[in-house]
Image (cartoon, helix red, strand yellow):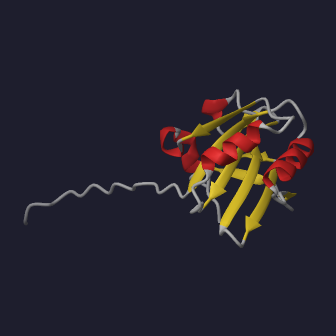
Amino acid sequence: MGKQRKYTLIIDCNYDYEMIGICSHHSDYRLVWGINTALNLNLEKADENFVVVTKKGQNLSSHSLYEFKDTENLVEYYLIKNKNEGKFLIPEKQDIDYFLFLHENYLDNSSELIQKLKSVSSVLAVFNFNPEEITSTENLVFN
């Protein structure tokens, strides 16, 4: 019998979205109204919540979701509430109330977008996060 070889499979996650944290004490619909006005978007409540699922297919948590698909600029916007029923979308960032995800953003106008978000009256603070530095982002999948 020949010598057996061992192979190691390394899966590298490809994050095709930008992640912006928003602190706000207002309800999600009021925050969405302010963001839509300031950024000229049309975020709307999705029919279903954003569900975080384990690798085994078990539901971990469900979160309020607003979405807008900008077909002109080919960017998809998702605003997701971080905390729901004591469970967090991103447990490492418990101080953040909402996350705005820019899926497949090829415009790269995030610094301008952050400045506009800071001008919204219901926004207390805005933070730009690198999804690669947060381990729980592996559970986030955008279709």
Quadrant for residue 5, please give it: bottom left
Q: Position of residue 135 (x, y in %)?
A: 52, 40
Q: Residue at x 65, y 38 (%)?
A: 90
Q: Would you place residue 72 above or below residue 137 in this image? A: below
Residue 58 can be seen, yes or no: no
Outermost residue, bottom direction?
A: 71
Q: Residue at x 32, y 57 (%)?
A: 9
> Which of 112/43 is in front?
112
> Which of 82/77 is in front?
77
Quadrant for residue 89, please give it: top right
Q: Position of residue 139 (x, y in %)?
A: 59, 49
Horizontal relation, residue 127 to residue 122: left or right: left
Quadrant location, the N terminus: bottom left
> Which of 71/81 is in front?
71
Horizontal relation, residue 20 to residue 40: left or right: left
Residue 28 can be seen, yes or no: yes
Outermost residue, left direction?
A: 2
Q: Position of residue 31 (x, y in %)?
A: 86, 42
Q: Would you place residue 66 above or below residue 104 in this image? A: above
Q: Position of residue 19 (x, y in %)?
A: 62, 46
Q: Residue at x 87, y 51 (%)?
A: 37
Horizontal relation, residue 30 to residue 136: left or right: right
Quadrant location, the C terminus: bottom right
Q: Residue at x 73, y 67 (%)?
A: 70
Q: Would you place residue 116 above or below residue 104 in this image? A: above
Outermost residue, top direction?
A: 95
Give the total of numbered labels: 0
